[in-house]
Amino acid sequence: MQIHQDRAEKLENWLNSIIETKFKITAISGDASFRRYFRVNTGEQSLIAVDAPPATENTSLFVQLSRALQAREIAASKVIACDLQNGFMLQADIGNLHLADVINQANYQTHYQNLFPLINKFQQLNQEQDLNLANYNEAMLTTEGQIFLEWYVKRHLDFQHTEAFLTLYKKLESIITKAFTCQPQRVIHRDFHCKNIMLDTAQSPPYTLIDFQGAVHGPITYDLVSLLRDCYLVWPVDAVTQLSELYRAQYHPQISTENWQYWFDLTGLQRHLKCLGIFCRLYYRDNKADYLKYLPNVLSYCLQVCQRYPQLREFAHWLETHSIKNEITTNAK
């Protein structure tokens, strides 16, 4: 696309203005957003250049958060230089190894427990940091709900929003909103999963956070459910429940197990309904078909929760009835 070519030329010109030596620039990949990444090799060091279009990406917040995280000694993408007007960043190169590349049946519980302190530490970023983070409020929930309605229900399932369905969905939305807002609110990463955690075996612990520009003030269980019920991975239900309870007992013992489990479930349900919509939007709008293969995982998570609670079983029935049959998986049972 011409727009990509134009931005690539601007990015290279900017890099030439801040890097004194000759360098070679190589495209790495894009991601689920409009950001694109490049490896910059000077011969003496390797760096990462980021093209984050200002119309869609909040580079200013990313830079603020990076500095706040560095100040708290939380390993995260380090910004070396930035051009906020054009949405360009130069970052330290933290390699190619993601948690997704190494996690497996034998080690997932160890990795997750090792990540618990990082979740808790990230959530200690408070408002005195002057980050001006948005609140995960009813308006944001409604906006994210529209992604599910428009891209999964209407576009992917080709289901028109009947009055009966919208009444059913509004009931669900109300239940989710109450579960979100009654929880303690903390700074949350909002996309804490295996593809947003890099590994550097030279440091201890080896984990480095990336893609944290979506951070908001939100429900305390959000990052934990993003990690344990990862859209890209599925683990046994009982093991996930035990890990969630272990986190609660360690960091929030004042919250009852029952309340914690309910918040964990409903928060995950909201996230996974949104992800159904996002993955379909990535396919239909952005021509990124790879995300469709994760729809069975996400739908299975939604069904698990909806079938567990009587007030959600009517919506579970709707999902089972209308979702494409081959998207319903049982591998999480």
Image (cartoon, rainbow, N blue to C red):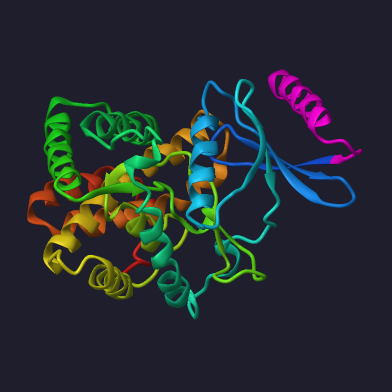
Horizontal and vertical percent position of residue 263: 19, 55
The residue located at (17%, 38%) in the rendering is 173
Horizontal and vertical percent position of residue 309: 12, 57
Horizontal and vertical percent position of residue 179: 16, 47
The residue located at (38%, 30%) in the rendering is 155
Asked if residue 176 is positioned above or below residue 20 in the image, the reply reads below
Q: Quadrant of the C terminus?
A: bottom left
Check if residue 18 falls in the magenta segment. Answer: yes
Asked if residue 203 is positioned above or below residue 64 in the image, the reply reads below
Left or right placement of residue 56 versus residue 7 in this view: left
Asked if residue 326 is positioned above or below residue 160 in the image, the reply reads below
Left or right placement of residue 327 versus residue 270 in this view: right
Check if residue 302 falls in the magenta segment. Answer: no
The residue located at (31%, 57%) in the rendering is 301
Left or right placement of residue 46 versus residue 279 in this view: right
Q: Quadrant of residue 252?
A: bottom left
**Foreground of the two, 196 or 250:** 250
Q: Quadrant of the N terminus?
A: top right
The residue located at (48%, 34%) in the rendering is 61
Left or right placement of residue 306 versus residue 70 in this view: left
Q: Quadrant of residue 256?
A: bottom left
Q: Is residue 234 visible?
A: no
Q: Is residue 313 visible?
A: yes
In the image, farthest residue toward the left? 310
Horizontal and vertical percent position of residue 240: 32, 70
* Magenta segment main secondary structure: helix
Task: Give the number of marks.
Answer: 0
In the image, farthest residue toward the bottom? 106
* Residue range (magenta): 1-24
**Foreground of the two, 29 or 11:** 11
